[in-house]
Amino acid sequence: MANQPQSLNRSGLVGLCIFLGTLLTFGTGQIRYSVPEETDKGFFVGNISKDLGLEPWEVAERGVRIVSKGKTQLFALSPRGGSLVTASRIDREELCDTLPSCLLNLEILVEDTLKIYGVEVEITDINDNAPSFREEEVEIKVSEHTSPGSRFPLPNARDPDAGMNSLQSYQLSPSGYFSLQVRGGTDGDKNPELVLEEGLDREKEASHHLRLTALDGGDPIRKGTVPIRVVVLDVNDHIPKFTQSVYRVSIPENLSSGTRVLVVNATDPDEGINGEVVYSFRKMKNKASEIFQLNSQTGEVLVGKPLDFEKYRFYEMEIQGQDGGGLFSTATLLITIMDVNDNTPEITVTSSINSVPENSPSGTVIALLNIQDQDSGENGEVTCFIPNGLPFKLEKTYGNYYKLITNSELDREQVESYNITLTAKDQGSPPLSTETHLLLQVADANDNPPVFTHPSYSAYIPENNPRGSSVFSVTAVDRDSRENAQVTYSLAEDTIQGTPLSSYVSINSDTGVLYALQSFDYEQFQTLQLGVTASDNGDPPLSNNISLTLYVLDQNDNTPEILYPSLPTDGSTGVELAPRSAEPGYLVTKVVAVDRDSGQNAWLSYRLLKASEPGLFSVGLHTGEVRTARAMMDKDALKQSLVQAPPNTDWRFSQAQRPGTSGSQNGDETGTWPNNQFDTEMLQAMILASASEAADGSSTLGGGAGTMGLSARYGPQFTLQHVPDYRQNVYIPGSNATLTNAAGKRDGKTPAGGNGNKKKSGKKEKK
């Protein structure tokens, strides 16, 4: 007869659930709760926000969530109340089977602090299962010669509930021949036995019908029954005997279905049907009947369904051998499941970031990981690691949790991103491993200032340049990215001859191109010293400075100016005297002119434009010396008129007249002329300074014989063996002397020409 389940009084359960759904505190530092099984979804388990020291509204704001890994999520967090509630119906027997206590562990993550809290929830039992028997009906065969006091084992009932709600007692329906006795086993089980109280007489009563009832201790009490039929047999005086009272075997968990575990054997010396032994499972626990199969004829125990060490590690059962006469004996079968490394480690990224600033300090948390392996022993011991050479490391935190942190400074300019391989490997043989990857971008920080392509710059611009023209450009490169690499150019504040630099030059802040705001005048200044700053757009910005020297190049934009002879202020012509007895080559006077330009633009040439007596006088092309070209004759007028021709409009030498290696001079004007602007400017300055010194008698040009003081002033490369004696180009006003014969007098030598060009009678008109 089938078992009839008893109805559960739910009215008394509500108060019990509220009482049990309270916080249990222990000294382990974990949060513990208890909740009864079979409660509805959303049932209150505990005030998790209070126990974490949070306000209810902080649960959602601070990212509090359950991170425990499992096939079924049994609990959830109430976003508004901050409570731990059930996520579905919980069946204690399904979760914990016959374990005396059912404890579930989960982890709570506080996202903003990356802290893990352990929570242990005890699932308390309610009396929702009635005791039941595996057998629909039990038949016991008893020989009619069986002596009173003989015992016959009865089937055990099973109740998956725990505590008082589990199986507590058995009852036997009234009988004049049989009684019930319950013996306690070493494992705490209650084993019912049928005891023969009176001798049997098959001829009087061939069979007896009894009912065995199993009762639990719940409120109300639940029970289950099984009918028992006792068949009285003729005499069978031998019982089957097993070769071992206890069979022990250890098998690996990876045995396939149908594999033979072992063979049990029982023998019966009786003949015929009384000697034929039939095998059957009797007492089975932990769903063993679903896992193993027993061949009733051969005694072979086979694997019926896949084994799983992680779920069940040990099976205990009884095997009964019964002969055809109804006699039987039992043997115990103990099966131990050995772990096989059949589970690869699992890596769960609980929390992670995908970008980290390059200036983050060492120890910055990149990710929180959970490592698990369902195997046991060495097969379940897992090590987690990352490749060498990376600026990261793994640190173990709570339980099986690891955090990936930075181990050294990052530099985006060297490595912009990392594809980090996380490997979890167990200690099995052979070991199993798994990998997961984290892609981490290194965010730029403004740690590189702009760098110019050159340590300093020099630029050249001709004077009289157009206003607004491009002068030069500078370039700076910033190794950072985005706004940290955007370079802005500016000029340092400064003044030139009292005028702000910004009125002369500007710079394009984006391109670094410099523009002239005015037309430069070489005669006003020859160089501009600029300070250029390149700044990035970081926060705070970084900058770098360089110096830029802007050289103004001279252009031929000034006409020569005659210094001597000076024209009288009354409008008359200038007068020079020369003796009538002057010989050819006699120095009458020397025209001294200067040009404000520099270099070749300042070298002058002279020519005689008009003379009252052509052929009587000549002028030195480059010296400006006016000399007699022949001896004066009586027919020559006492008064001669000469004009200085103005220079050519381009004021430049012809190719034959050009100084330097491209041309040569004749007579006393031969020599090598300076061939670049720098040398000619130095020489020009020397000549003008020498003219001034000679005029006041303080000339220092005699720094050494044949040197004109050039070595002392401009270095040994400027000596008379390198350049012609330009002292003859400078005439000393108020005297017939030139720098040449002035220097000769100081040296105690008679100047070339002999008579010192002494003035005598005779006049010359000069315009």
Image (cartoon, helix red, strand yellow):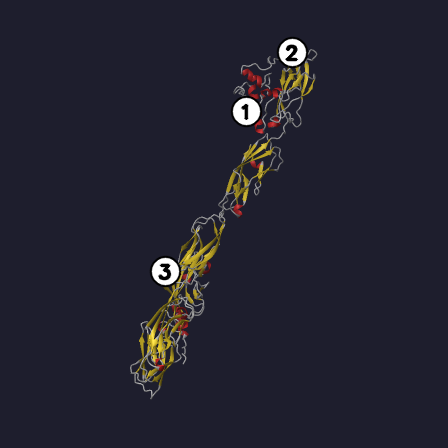
Quick one: quadrant of the C terminus?
A: top right
Which of the two discs, 3 and 1, labels the residue nearer the N terminus? 3
Tell me the residue at 35%/62% (across/down). 26
Q: Is residue 528 visible?
A: yes
Q: Number of callouts in the render?
A: 3
Q: Which disc, if any, is residue 718?
A: 1
Q: Looking at the picture, does residue 40 appear above or below residue 430? A: below
The residue under label 2 is 581
SS assignment at label 2: loop
**Distance between the Cα atoms at labels 2 and 3?**
132 Å
Q: Whole-percent x and y of residue 226?
A: 38, 80
- Disc nearest the viewer among 1 and 2: 1
Q: Whole-percent x and y of residue 331?
A: 33, 74
Which of the two discs, 2 and 3, labels the residue nearer the N terminus? 3
The three-letter amino acid code for the residue at tag 2 is: Ser
Which of the 4 quarters of the picture holds residue 197?
Answer: bottom left
SS assignment at label 1: loop
Q: Which disc, if any, is residue 29?
A: 3
- Disc nearest the viewer among 3 and 1: 1
Is 353 or 231 nearer to us in this picture?
231
SS assignment at label 3: loop
Which of the two discs, 1 and 2, labels the residue nearer the N terminus? 2
Q: Is residue 394 left or right of residue 723?
A: left
Q: Is residue 54 visible?
A: no
Which of the 4 quarters of the picture holds residue 186?
Answer: bottom left
The three-letter amino acid code for the residue at tag 3 is: Gly
Q: Whole-percent x and y of residue 48?
A: 41, 62
Q: Whole-percent x and y of residue 419?
A: 48, 53
The three-letter amino acid code for the residue at tag 1 is: Phe
Q: Looking at the picture, does residue 106 appear above or below residue 646? A: below
Q: Looking at the picture, does residue 344 appear above or below residue 586? A: below
